[in-house]
Amino acid sequence: MSDEKSKVGQELWGGRFSEPTDRFVQRFTASEAFDRELASYDIAGSRAHASMLEAVGVLTAAENTAIQEGLARVLAEIEAGAFQWSVEREDVHMNIEARLTELIGDVGKKLHTGRSRNDQVATDMRLYLRTEIDIICGQLTRLQSGIVGLAAQHTETVMPGFTHLQVAQPVTFGHHLMAWYEMLDRDHGRLLDCRQRLNQSPLGAAALAGTTFPIDREQTAIALGFTGPTNNSLDSVADRDFAIEFCAAAALILSHLSRMSEELILWASAQFGFISLPDRFCTGSSIMPQKKNPDVPELVRGKSGRTTGNLVALLTLMKAQPLAYNKDNQEDKEALFDSVNTLNDCLKAFADMVPAIEAHSAAMRNAALKGFATATDLADYLVRAGVAFRDAHEVVGKAVAHCIDAECDLADCSLETLKTFHAGIEHDVYQVLTLEGSIAARDHIGGTAPNQVRAAIALAQTKLNR
Ligand code: ARG
């Protein structure tokens, strides 16, 4: 192979090599096909680095100006879709640097002074994830607002609350929705924690040990919106905790969305009939004309497999890697990007869909009437009449068995019948046997009484509007 040909793909590091990279190895080791996602962050990092080099006297003002203008042109080319990505230039960093040098000449070769692709990629990844977390938090807030808005319309809408998917006690639909809100509120906190911890600049760690140039790490950190530089150069290039933390938060959010999806799917079935999903979020069957399938929640439920997989992939990727940088780390990108994109899409789908959910109050109420949802209220009533709870539980169990045989509800039994189970039962028992009585009685912080749910909604609204 001619000397000229051997330079292809090795233009930025080929000095010590005596033969060109194997074609397959070139493709196998390249990341440009996916890490181009980082291009704008890579350029922002390079611009901050070059300005810092000027400030400390490593570059002249003219050199920095040329680099700044050149990088702006490279970014414009990328944004316009005119940039020629090349697998021979391996990754986003070398594609951009090589193009810069094509555009501005040899001064472009000075950009890489005092840094390495190792601190460069660590910086790019943090900048990327910080931006994406902000976008995701916006979607999450939109979804939470939608949930709270729907809850506010249903603070008095009675539905069965379930344990073991068996009717347990009546709750309001608003109360159930506010449980979803709480799950997402914790998720929001996890994302903000992750953002805060990742927001330190690895730039200046160079390959692993720092650099011999008189760099100012504070300057680049501040220029890029970080709170400051990271503390240890080895850790800076080896750490991918931030990506793992994010993927863990993303997996948990998808796990929550998957649980919500499951409920929506059940509720939208003919057997429950609690809700209708808007047609625009459903699809039909190519063979069964009557079908309206809840595809969006089903797909969200299924997508949770990806985010769990990505988390496991990153944990496995990082486990047992010796310090500092290893090429293994290149494998962090597709998993992280996939979790970011999946989460963004699923949150968007949910945020658009939830406010358009139509609740069928009558069906919810009927279901709550069916499963002896007020049995605990009857036991509590007996306790107030002086019966020990365990004895009251036994009495009510017998009354329920009777109702199952008689195919009626507790509230349908005459006072005479109820008294056969316990003589202490009086006419006022019917107040506690109604769904509304049961709900209104759970009147404490976190309870399902309508005024408590309204208070929870007000708190949530204050938090969301902050
Ligand atoms: N493409 C590489 C990655 O994603 C960039 C860093 C390369 N560093 C190196 N020493 N080969 O991790």
Image (cartoon, helix red, strand yellow):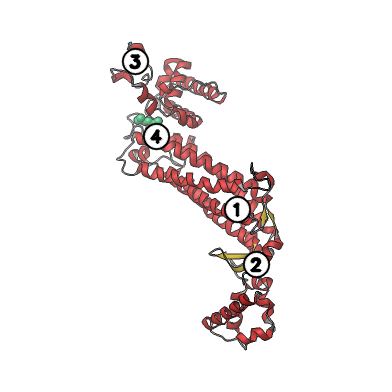
Describe the element under mark 3 as helix, strand or loop.
helix
Tell me the residue that label 1 is attached to. 265
Q: Position of residue 329 (x, y in %)?
A: 37, 36
- Whether residues under marks 3 and 2 lie with C-beta atoms below 8 angstroms apart, the answer is no
Residue displayed at 64% across by 43% down:
287
Q: Position of residue 172 (x, y in %)?
A: 65, 64
Residue displayed at 64% across by 59% down:
272
> Going from the N terminus, do you reach mark 3 or mark 2 first?
3
Cα separation, mark 1 vs mark 4, equals: 39 Å
Q: Position of residue 266 (x, y in %)?
A: 60, 56
Residue behind label 3 places its C-beta within 8 angstroms of ligand 1: no
For residue 383, above or below residue 123: below
Residue 6's disc is 3
The quadrant of the rendering that contains the N terminus is top left
Q: Nearer the viewer, mark 3 or mark 2?
A: 2
Describe the element under mark 4 as helix, strand or loop.
helix
Cα separation, mark 3 vs mark 4, equals: 25 Å
- Whether residues under marks 4 and 2 lie with C-beta atoms below 8 angstroms apart, the answer is no
Kindly identify the amino acid type of the residue bearing the numbered disc 4: Gln
Which is more toward the observer, 279 or 330?
279
Tell me the residue that label 2 is attached to. 368
Cα separation, mark 2 vs mark 1, equals: 19 Å
Cα separation, mark 3 vs mark 1, equals: 59 Å
Kindly identify the amino acid type of the residue bearing the numbered disc 3: Ser
> Going from the N terminus, do you reach mark 3 or mark 1 first?
3
